[in-house]
Amino acid sequence: MSRIVFVSGGSGFIGRAVVRELLKRQYRVHALVHRRPLPIDDGRISTFAGELDDRAVLDAAMERCSAAIHLVGIIREDRPRNVTFHRMHVDFTRTVVDACVRHGVMRYIHMSALGARADSPSLYHQTKAAAEAIVESSGLSWTIFRPSLVHGPEGEFSQMLLDWARRRKAPWLFMPYFGAGLLGTGRKYLVQPVLVDDLARMIVDAIDLPVTIGKRYDVGGIQHLTWPEMYHLFSREVVGRRRLALPIPAWYALLLTRILPPALLPFNRAQVIMSQEDSVADIEPIRRDFNFRPAGFSESLSRYARQLR
């Protein structure tokens, strides 16, 4: 069997970690990239530049592959550039699945999101659920991963927290999160951050693990944290002191998304809505099928905090 794996979104945050893990396991990679080049110099990587709806580019990238890993996703829409949740999550999943069928690439690994469901109030989660439905009806040997918040030294989330902790970006005096209730001081929702390298390990493990075929895995580290708890852990580890974490009422943030242009806000409606529910996972199936325990936020942060300084 070919040791070539197709990866969509290979130049992204999760994609780079997956490509590195594939190379570590002696796979060759056919990476489809859009705007950013893949910043990994290795002769075992072949890059294919283009959109996922460019059939010629996608067919060339699928040639001789034995498995496909589809990672493309967005957290913010840019409608003037036709970057929408439906196109990026639903339409592009359909094009990749169809290409796998055309080329006989039966092993398919899909990146979804924890909380994906058709009845979600968030369009992000609705489109992730619609993509899962396409995968499940594809006839391919699929595995779906549904991570909670993914973090690591190269990720936008960690860089944002670093800027807040070092008081380099607004609001400067505190680290903000979206809070429930009138003043934002209501229930504090939970997240279960997973280190990007741990997620990449599971994705690549799944290629040759028959027990994972036809299964969806909710993915998180071993720690359940509120947003303020996560911010406090981060600031203590990275800048040596606990920074103040204060809420912005979610209702007010949602109002801003309705009255202000998206370019003026560092967040969008989907992000606010998703913050108002727990994002936690039962990781027992991961322990059972992968014989692996994803690290908690404190443990994994201690591994890479120096890279952020």
Image (tube, rainbow, N blue to C red):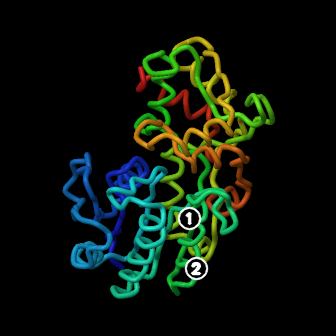
Q: Position of residue 6 (x, y in %)?
A: 34, 68
Q: Which residue is mark 1?
A: 128
Tell me which numbered mark, 2 or 1, is placed earlier along the sequence.
1
Residue 187: x percent and y percent?
80, 36
* Mark 1: few/some/many CA within 10 Å (<14, 14-19, 20+): many
SS label for mark 1: helix
The C terminus is located in which quarter? top left
Residue 295 percent across, percent down from the top left: 61, 41
Q: Residue at x 60, y 71 (%)?
A: 212
Q: Is residue 29 above or below residue 192?
A: below
Q: Residue at x 68, y 56 (%)?
A: 287
Question: Are circles 2 and 1 on residues that touch, CB within 8 Å?
Answer: no
Q: Would residue 254 be found to the left or right of residue 182 on screen?
A: left
| Distance from the alpha carbon under mark 2 to that under mark 1 | 12 Å
**Total numbered circles:** 2
Which residue was labeled with disc 2? 136
